[in-house]
Amino acid sequence: MTGTTTPPLAEALAAGPLVLDGGLSNQLEAAGHDLGDELWSARLLAERPEAIVDAHQAYVEAGADVVITASYQATFEGFARRGTGPRRAAELMALSVELAREAGRRAGAGRPLWVAASVGPYGAMLADGSEYRGRYGLSVAELERFHRPRIEVLAGAGADVLALETVPDALEAEALLRAVRGVGVPVWLSYTVDGGCTRAGQPLEEAFRLAAGVEEVIAVGVNCCVPGDVGEAVALAARVVGKPVVAYPNSGERWDARGRAWEGGSAFDAGAVRGWRDAGARLIGGCCRMGPPAITEITDALRR
């Protein structure tokens, strides 16, 4: 749903908080799809696009205002390893935006919906869990060259915003912020964090400050962290950056990259959501292991 009835996302954020969707991968797995592949959910862009539409639609029906595309792990390099050439890879990345739009149309939500094109970190392409460590050994310039081509594709596909998400390292954030210059689409920047630091160990205040003067950035915050780390991070981002804050933690379970499995139990409490809102969060949702029921809880908490 786009057009005259859907205002720019930055404008909508000024009117109050919006609800993001939840973890795409867990919704696909719950529907019986095997994601044990280096391309993760991006593999289904080619093989089962209807499954992606269904997963998005479940979140719209749960109350999500913003749908994040299946492009987190979609890169030219990752597709090339599977024998997919650059032209087809670009088509699949662009398709991720259209599938999210289609889900909104099918849901018939009767309200504005926005599509956020996911731009995952370099570590997501490596598929070895390094998006939770950072420190890839690459320069800012090298990371910028990696990210820019797919950013251009996703921006050209008509996304309302680019979600620079699960960023573990301030150096990669710097590269991403360089890569989005002049693409003509707003972005949000969200780090995956551990306490008051990025996963790479940089102080979160310094990491947030990188986005303070960047015109393209309409929100900054955290995602794919434990729920307990969200409150302080939201307050810090609001104070340091002076822009709306985005917050979408995982359930609190932890990913074992070697065993390729989640460990522990959920620590998410929807009662905390109003506190995040009051601290400055304007985009609130869930990440890994946060399904449609959790998004409904968030929607209810924010609109109660």
Image: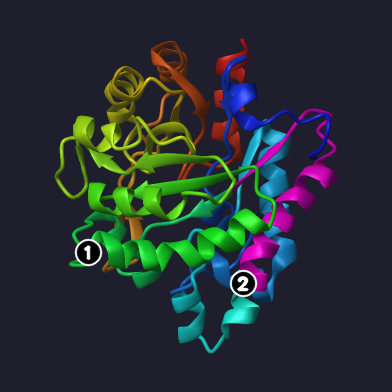
Can residue 73 be seen here? The reply is no
Is 66 on the left or on the right of 212, as rendered?
right
Question: In terms of image quadrants, where is residue 190?
Answer: top left
Q: Is residue 20 left or right of residue 59?
A: left
- Residue at 83%, 45% in the rendered image: 105
Q: Residue at left 26%, top 40%? A: 193
- Give me the disc on residue 109: none
Tell which of 304 and 87 is nearer to you: 87
Horizontal and vertical percent position of residue 229: 28, 30
Q: What is the x, y in percent for residue 120?
A: 43, 56
**Residue 256 x, y percent position in the rendering:** 28, 60
Judged by its main secondary structure, the magenta piece is helix
- Quarter the C terminus occupies: top right
Report if residue 93 is visible in the image: yes
Give the residues drawn in magenta, as a range.
90-116
Mark 2 / mark 1, whichever is N-terminal? 2
Residue occupying the far front of the picture: 182
Q: Nearer the viewer, residue 41 or 67?
A: 67
Assign a secondary structure to mark 2. helix
Q: Is residue 212 magenta?
A: no
Magenta includes 115? yes
Amino acid on which disc 2 is placed: Ala
Which residue is under mark 1?
139
Which three-letter amino acid code belongs to the residue tagged 1? Ser
Q: Which residue is mark 2?
A: 90
Instruction: Residue lying at the far bottom in this picture: please name it.
Output: 83
Q: SS at mark 1?
A: loop
The local crowd at label 2, few if under 14, some if 14 to 19, many if 20 or more residues have their Cα within 10 Å, is many
In the rendered structure, are the residues bearing label 2 and label 1 in contact, judged by CB atoms less than 8 Å apart?
Answer: no
